[in-house]
Amino acid sequence: MSADEPIDVAVLVEAPARRRRGRVSAPLVAGSILLGIIVAACLLSFVYLPYPPDQIGGGRLTPPSGAHWLGTDTLGRDLLSQLMVGARIALAAGGGSVLLGGCLGLVLGLAAALAQRWIDDAIAAILDILIAFPTLLLAMLVVAARGETLGSAVLAIGLAMSAIVARLTRILAKQVLSAQFVTAARTSGTGWLGILGGHVLPNIWPTLAVNLALQFGLAVLAEASLSYLGLGAPPPNASWGRLLEQAQGTVYTAPVGAIAPGLALIMLVLGANLLADGLRDVLDPTRRTR
């Protein structure tokens, strides 16, 4: 291009924009890889396991070898097989808690945003109480009422999570409902269902998706904590938290028993957090153009 030729400003402006749109979010890729490894181990456990997870006969606390890649635990069970089965429990706990908490929180938050002032204030006060209520104490109450099962842990975590999702949904929905395009839609005769489906949900789901991805990692940690305390999935379920509890007495003589489930938890939670960060980069238009 010569100095006398005119410069197309639109081309100069659109080129960086195209580069921004084509740029891949590194946290999204890293989080997908970490989560993909755990999901692959979970799916593989349904068709192949090195040993039955409750089989005893490999020797107590044997070090990693060709027969047992991660060694054995205090009862002589293959640690790799237990980790693969534990991936099922971790994903089921995280996914079930997010599904339960997300559905309850979405319904309750939308109801509060659409309700009258005094009903909205009452729901907001109840949500504040639920958020301040310790999840561990709630889990103890649920376990005492329903028994020590994975479903009880998921129910307790989901109920605690629903209050957080409901408060976020309430705030986001009220912001959208106060916008001028919603007022115009109501003036034109659009019903509340049409406003929720056509205006509110499309505008709040990106933020909710990011929050639910973060809540997934927190739910996995909460289930591991409950299993560590004996309030999660009962034996012989190989929950990662229960594996950590069983390995705490042999952490110096057989450290793999504590390191392996700890690393698995770190991979899953870090993957969920990175995925949430990547979704924020992709779904938030202000971050895409920054």
Image (spheres, helix red, strand yellow):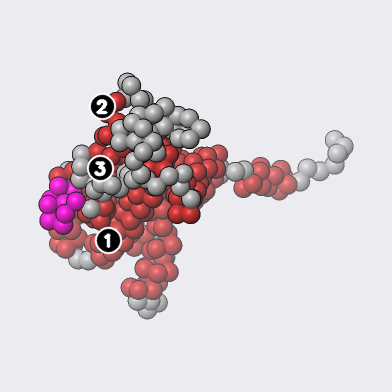
Give the amino acid type for the residue marked by disc 3 in the picture: Ser
- Where disc 2 sits, the SS reads helix
Give the numbered dot on residue 104.
1
- Tell me the quarter of the image containing the C terminus: top right
Give the numbered dot on residue 249.
2
Q: Earlier in the sequence, mark 2 or mark 1?
A: 1
Give the amino acid type for the residue marked by disc 2 in the picture: Gly
Give the amino acid type for the residue marked by disc 1 in the picture: Leu
Circle nearer the viewer, 2 or 3: 2
| Residue 200 falls within the magenta-colored stretch | no
Q: Position of residue 181 (x, y in %)?
A: 42, 65
Give the numbered dot on residue 227.
3
Give the numbered dot on residue 193.
none
| Residue 139 falls within the magenta-colored stretch | yes
Asked where in the image residue 172 lies, by quadrant, the reply is bottom left
Q: CA distance from mark 2 to mark 3?
A: 16 Å
Q: Residue at 41% across / 53% down in the picture? A: 209
Residue 163 visible in the picture: no
- Where disc 3 sits, the SS reads helix
Q: Residue at 45% across / 54% down in the picture? A: 46
Q: Position of residue 10 (x, y in %)?
A: 71, 48
Q: Earlier in the sequence, mark 1 or mark 3?
A: 1
Circle nearer the viewer, 1 or 3: 3
Q: Given contact means CB atoms under 8 Å apart, are the residues at marks 2 and 3 in contact?
A: no
Mark 2 neighbour density, 10 Å: few (under 14) some (14–19) many (20 or more): few
Q: Position of residue 255 (x, y in %)?
A: 36, 25
**Residue at the outermost bottom position:** 189
Q: Nearer the viewer, residue 70 or 198?
A: 70
Q: Earlier in the sequence, mark 2 or mark 3?
A: 3
